[in-house]
Amino acid sequence: MTSSASQPWWKRAGWAVFAIAVLYAIDLAAKIPVGQTDGSTRPVLNLYLYQIIASAAVNIILAVSLQLINGITGQFSIGHAGFMAIGGYAAADFSLHSGIDLAAICGGGALGESVSFVVALMIGAVFAAIAGLIVGIPSLRLRGDYLAIVTLGFGEIIRVIILNVDRVGAARGLSGIPQKTTIFTGYAFAAITVLVVWNIYHSSFGRAMLAVREDEIAAEAMGIRTTRTKVMAFVISSGFAGLAGGLFAHLFMYLHTNTFTFVKSIEIVMMIIIGGLGSITGAVFGGVVMTALPEVLRPVGQWRMVVYSLIIILAIRYRPQGLLGMRELPDILASLRRKKGGAR
Amino acid sequence: MSTFIQQLINGLALGSIYALIALGYTMVYGVLRLINFAHGDVYMVGAYAGYYIARAMAPEGTGGGYLLPIAVFVGSMGACALIGVIIERVAYRPLIRQSRLAILITAIGVSLLIENLGIVIFGAAPQSFPSILPERTFQLGGNVVLRYAQISIVVVSILLMILLRWVVMGTKTGLAMRAVSHSIDASKLMGVPTDRTISFTFALGSAFAAAAGVLVAVYIPKIEPLMGVMAGLKAFVAAVLGGIGNIPGSLIGGVLIGLSETLIVGYGGNIGIESTYRDAVAFAILIIVLLVRPQGLLGKIQKEKV
């Protein structure tokens, strides 16, 4: 089915170790101090660029997880930012209130810090997944545009509720979150997300999702429990959105509900459409493109967002199936190889 | 009691505005099955068009008599009708045979484009809308105050809705609109000029949004380029609530959401709902209604065909 599945386990493990080493090396290299003219030192990559690169990883997680609902299961959710918000706030709240204690229990130092960070992220993911379950069970009985508008509604309701919780700063926003997300952790979690979603996609459960996407009535007739399949997709996807929220919180050190409006949800939807609906590779691609695009356009000045929206309109106009369509990385590699073979 | 009546009046005025915007969503959805995300931004452009017309006609702020409000209304509605047609021709028509998702994302792109063009052209700072109607208030019994703007909102909305009903039910173009909303392919085979009908639907919907934009600017004289985002969203919710594609449904949905919003702000404190929840109310009502009646209040159940 895929090239990676046919490789022996030690070869795959080797690749994983290699990838981790490369990621870690990139992260370390980004922090190498460089002497400035005034005698001080700064890292090679300034904080701004570092955050942008790391936030691409957050967007990859968001896009790949939404792809599970919108692309693979064929439902239409435009409330992803709400789950991201829940994960972000839950993880940040844990870090602020119990993070230091847990780090101390685990022996302090780098290990304790990492453990408490991962626990915070997991708490965020679990909270978001539970919210996904609560939202998913009633709303997934609806279809098409009605489902879309209900997910949008839930996203906004989640945002307004958080806005009224004083414990997480209400309208002031939540500040003072420790910065723990690095390029390394961001991309490591992005890789885990891709791997998990990829494996779900290629499992029997993933085929049930595809069946629901292609024809819900036929799928039901074949004995697939369609509502359960949809709710599961929703829960898993929300959990990963929560993970992304946690990483986001610990990257920018500040959360405000204005970040998580439906505009953010729409942005995530655009990532998967631009990348190619139904393609995990496309989602990764879309996440990176949609992070980079506004930054690349900075020289245009005040016309930046105008150009940005024009590019989106034109991209859909001339490539409505997205940049990659439904193709995945192995398909692309295979077709490239075939072309090469043909030339020979 | 008098506060309650006051809240009802405020809610009715707000609801009429939502209803006017919702009509545009519902009509476009009816013919194209498209959630026209750019519609809320057309409403914003309508308010700005009114602003510039009023400024051009009466530079010192007020004056101009009865001609001024009429010119502002007609001018703004005409300008937005044109913009609506341009959006449909340039952005949506080439994609009509593509997947619905492609058109949807284009609609979102157009919405972003209008908002950001608005920020560049009109400036991000809010502008205060000139008072084109006399600032008169009517003291009813008790402490109930009826503002001139509120009366004009309700009256203009009712007039426009009567006009719309006549267009849809009493003219040949309206018949074409209804035919297209049943089946675009069958209408084409029957000789209905579908392209022209769709353009006309956009023009009509956008003109209504412009009227809503001018009315809201008269009511709350502060306009800004992002004013259409929340209003558009709530109006869309109103359209879905009433049963999208159904014109009386949008009316009921709009008034329902306007009323519940003002009532929550007015009385929510008594039952433990802070007024900061006002933006969530519309969505909460929508979700509850859709769970009980998935087709909306007046919508028809679409039979699933295998």
Image (tube, coloured by chain):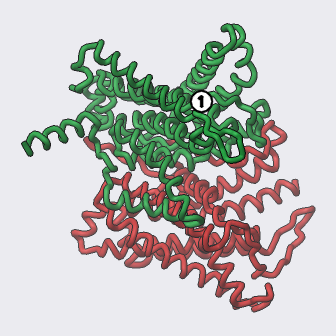
Chain colours: A green, B red
In the drawing, does residue A3 fall left or right of residue A19? left
Quarter of the N terminus of chain A within the rendering: top left
Provide residue A2's location: percent of width, then percent of height. Answer: 23, 26
- In this view, the residue farthest toward the right is B142
Q: Which of B170/B151 is in front?
A: B151
Quarter containing the C terminus of chain A: top left
Q: Residue at x 71, y 31 (%)?
A: A177
Which of these two is toward me, B261 or A50? A50
Q: At 39% from the left edge and 42% from the top edge, which residue is drawn?
A: A285
Give SS at disc 1: loop
Which residue is disc 1 drawn over?
A181
Apparent side of residue A196 relative to residue B229 in the rendered image (left or right): left
Q: Nearer the viewer, residue B7 or A191?
A: A191
A224, above or below B206, in the image: above
Q: Quadrant of residue A22?
A: top left
Crowd rating for badge 1 (residues with CA inside 10 Å; few <14, some 14–19, many 20+): many
Left or right side of B190 for B229: right
Residue placed at 53% from the left, 45% from the top? A265
Residue at 25% across / 63% down in the picture? B185
Q: How many marks?
A: 1
Q: Position of residue B264 (x, y in %)?
A: 76, 47
Indicate the chain on which mark 1 is placed. Answer: A
Q: Vertical placement of A341 versus A11: above or below?
A: below
Q: Is any part of residue A262 visible from this angle? A: yes
Question: x, y (%) of residue B149?
Answer: 76, 73
The residue type indicated by label 1 comes to: Thr
Above or below residue A193? Residue B288 is below
Query: From this viewpoint, is residue B291 visible?
Result: no
Residue B89's x, y, as percent?
A: 38, 72
- B279 vs A58, left or right, is right
